Image: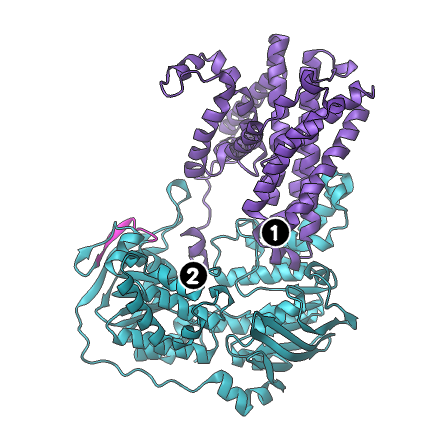
Amino acid sequence: MLEVERCTVNFGGIRALYDVSIEIGELEIVGIIGPNGAGKTTLFDVINGFRRPDDGRVRFRGLDITELPAHQRAAAGMARAFQNVGLIRGATVRTNLLAAEHLAARYSATAGLLGLPSTYADEHRLSRRAETLTEILGLSGLIDRDVDGLPYGVLKRIELAAVLATDPDLVLLDEPTSGLGPGEADQFGAMLLELRRTFGLTVLMIEHNVPFVADVCDHVYCLNFGEVLAAGKPHEVRNHPEVVRAYLGEEVPSWLLGADKPTEPLVVVDGVQVSYGTGHHRSAPVLRDLSFEVLQQERLVLLGLNGAGKTTTLSMLAGLLHPERGSIIFAGQNITDLTAAERVALGITLVPEGRQVFPGLSVDHNLRLGAWMHRHDSGHIAESRERVLRIFPQLAPRRGQLAGTLSGGEQQMLAIGRALMAKPRLLLIDEASLGLSPAITQAVFSMIDQINSQGVTVVLVEQGTAALSHADRAMILERGQIVHRGTGAETDHASLRERYLGTPA
Amino acid sequence: MHASSTTGLMARATVVGGLAALVLVFPLSRSGIEVNIYTEAVIYAIVGLSLNVLLGYAGQISLGHQAFVGIGAFTSAYMTTVHEQNFIAALLVTMVVGALQALFLGVVSLRITGLYFALVTLAYGRMAENSLFNITSLTGGSTGQAAPKPAAFASDYRYYYLCLAVLAVVLYVDWRLTSTKTGRALLAIRQDPKVAASFGASLKRYTLIAFIISGIFASVGGALLAHNTTSVVSSQFEFRLALVFVIMTVVGGLRSRAGVVVGSAFFSLTDYLFDKLHLAGAINAIPVVPDLSAELAPLVVGPLLLIFTLTRHPGGFGEMLRPLGRWLQGEHSPHDDDQPPVPASSNGVRAHA
C-alpha cells in the first residue's frame, strides 16, 4: 500500500534519514521503533508530505506521491496523528471533528459561503457523523466540550476520532501511547485492532512502548541514526542484538538509598486547595487539603493517573498557580503569595512538561535565558554552562544549533539544563520521560541523579513507574489527594501498581 | 418556575424590541444629515467585518484597508458617473475589482508573513493613495468623483435601510463562513497549518478565499460609503483611516460578529457622540492637546481603548456582549449552570497556566 523507496533527508549538514526503505501492506499494523533522534518523525514528515526527501520516492497505492503536498495526500486517504496532539485548541470537540471532516463535505466553499439550502443539510450530516465517531470512541458526553482542559489521555482519543473523521485508509500515529498509563495503553491496543476491522485501516506508528508494539504490530522497523537497523516480525526485531544494544540500552543500576541525607524539610505544603480559573469560571478544586513535605536533597517522585493533580502540584510549587487555602513554606520562608519569578530568585525552577525549549533559539541562547536572574554576571553564566555541559555532554557539540532541531531526548536534556542555569535549590521536573525511549529515559534519570548528588532537591512528576528506582521517596496522587507515601522501592510494589497506576502486576 | 421564565421571555422581548426600534425606527425621527451619519456607522460595520475576516479568521493583518475601501468607492462612483451604469451593475463590477486586488495581496501573503506582510499592506495602502487615487479620470481629481444615490434609494432614509440590508447579507455570509468548512479550515490553518493540511485543507486555497471575501466586503463598504456622501474625494482614504479600521475591529473583538459591528459603529460615531454629549469641549480642555479637532477623536480614544482591550479584555466588546447574547438566547449565565468540573490533567494545566 505504501512504499518508501530509498529516502534521504538532510537538515543542513545533519543527516536525518539515509537511504530508508519501508513497505506497508494493506490492513497491516506496522511499528517504527528507535532511539530519540533516529529520524522517526522525519520519516513521517516525508510520508505525509511535510518534507520533500532530498532523494528517494514515496509511493501510495502504486502512485508516486513524492511531489504531492500534504493536503492532497490527505485527500488520497492518508491521515496523521501528532506527537503533541494535533487538535484545534480553544475549540469544541465537535468543531475539531467537523474541521477534520473537511474533505467529507459535499458542498463547494462558495455554496457554503452563500448559505445555499443543501449546505445546511450536509452540515447536519457531518455533525451526525461526528457524533457517531465520538460514540464509537467512547467520547459521546464530551462532544460539545472545549478541548482545552481535557486530560491528555482523552485528547489523544479525540485526536484519533479526528483522524478517523478524515476517512483515512492509512493512518500515521506518532507515539500513540505516550502519556498514557500502562492500563490505558493496553486498552488503546485493543481499540486499535477493533478500529482496523471496522474501518479497514492500515496503520503505521512510531512507538517507544516495545511490549505494546510487540502485541499489536504485524511488522516492525527499527531506525537508528536515520537508517533502518532491523526489520521483521516484532519478536525478531525485539531480539535482534543490534536493536537491543542501540535501542533498549543497558539497565542503569539503581541509585543506592543515601542514608546520610539530611531529613529536615526544604518545603512544607500545608492544607492547600487549588482550582483553575477565577470567579464564576472557577473549577472544582483540583487539589484539596493537600499536605506534604519535600526533604532537603531528596528525590521525590509524584505518581498518579492523568488528572490526578500532579502537574497542578508542580505548578503550585513553582508559583504558576496560587492556592486559595493553605500555605507553602520554602526553606523556612512563607512563599505562598510569591510570584513564579520571585520563587526562581529563591532557587525554585520548573522544567515544564513537553520540554518547552525555545525552538528558534540556539542551545546556547536557551541556556543563557535560563540564567536570566544572573544575566549581568558573565562569570556565573560561564560557570553554570560548564556545569550543565558536564552533566549533558551531548549538548556540547550542538551549542550553536537551533533547539528546535534537536531530538526529543536532547530537548529534554536542554530543558533540564536550562533550569539548572538558574542554580536552583529545588528542581521541579514534569514528565521527564514523556516521549523518550527507555534507554534515553534511563540516561535522563541518571543525569537527574547526578544533579541531585550535587545537592539539588528534585521533585519529579512521572506517569510510569520507571522513575521509582531513582527515588528516595514517592507519593501517589489520586483526585488531588495523596493516597500513598513510601520509599521508591516500597511504592514499586505490585499491589500498589495495580491499585493506583493500572499496571497489571 | 414557569412564571419566571415567562418574565424572562418578556424581558428578552423588550430588549430585542428596544434594539430593533433603535436601529430600525429611531433614525426616522432624525434629520437626513444625522441619518447620513448613522448610515456611515452601518457601513463601518461592513468594513469591520471585512477586516475581521482577514485579522480574525485568516490571522493576516491589513494596514492598507483604506485602499480596499477606497478602491471600492472609486470604482462604484466611476461606473455610475462616468459609465452611467445602474447601481447594481456598478456594485458587481466593484465586487470583482475588490476581489481581484485582495487576491493580489493574498498571493503576496503566501510568500511573506507577519510583520513583513503588515509592511507590505501598509505600503500597498500608501501606493494606492499616491497613485491610483490620483488618476483624475477615475477619481475626478481634487474635486472628487460624483456618486449619486441609486434612484430607488435616493432619500437618506431609504439609503440607510439599503445599507442595513447589505449589512444583513454580509452578516449572513460571515455566519455561513464560520459555520461551514471554509471557516473551520481557516481556524485550523491559523492554529496549526500542519494539522490543517492533515485534515486535507489547503492553506493556499483558503487563505486566498479569505482575502477574496475580505476584499469583496471592503469594496462593497466602499461603494456604499461613496453613494452615502454622493461624492468621493481621495483625501477621504488616508492612512489614518486604516488605523481606525484596525482599532475598531480589534476593540470590537476579533471573531465576534456582534462585537465587530458594535465596535465599528462606535468608532464611526465617536465625533458625533462627542458632539452630542458635549465632550469636545472637555477634550479641548486637556492642556496637552489644545486644538484637537473632533475628527481626530477616534485616533485618541482608539489607542486608549486598544490598550485597555489588549491588556484587560482581549475579547473586546464581543466578550463583554457575550453574556447579553447568551441571555437573549434564553440560556443561563455561566455561573448558574453546573458545569462538570474540568478534570485537571497534566496537559490541560499548561493551557490554563
> Considering only order in the chain, which callout, 1 or 2, is on the residue closer to the N terminus?
1
Magenta-tinted stretch: A320-329
- Residue at disc 2, secondary structure: helix
What colour is chain B?
purple
The three-letter amino acid code for the residue at tag 2 is Ser
Q: Splitting the image into 4 quarters, where does residue A369 fall?
A: bottom left
Residue receiving disc 1: B188
Residue at 71% over, 18% down: B227
- Residue B77: x, y in percent? 74, 21
- The vertical placement of B221 against A33, above or below, is above
Left or right: where B167 falls relative to A144: right
**Of the pair B181 and B123, the residue shown nearer to us:** B123
| Callout 1 secondary element | helix
Q: Which residue, as the protein is rendered here, is positioned at the far bottom?
A: A241
- Image position of B52 with respect to A43: above or below: above
* Residue A201, label in figure: none
For the rendered model, the colour scheme is: by chain
Quadrant holding the N terminus of chain A: bottom right
> Which colour is chain A painted?
cyan
- Is residue A65 shown to the viewer in this render? yes
**Dot 1 crowding, Cα within 10 Å, few <14, some 14–19, many 20+:** many
Residue A479 visible in the snapshot: no
Q: Give the alpha-carbon distance from disc 2 to disc 1, as whole Å.
A: 24 Å
Residue at x-position 25% and y-position 74%: A454
Left/right placement of residue B333 relative to residue B130 reads left
Which corner quadrant holds the C terminus of chain A?
bottom left
Which residue is identified by label 2?
B346
- The residue under the point 57% across, 39% down is B255
Q: Is residue A327 magenta?
A: yes
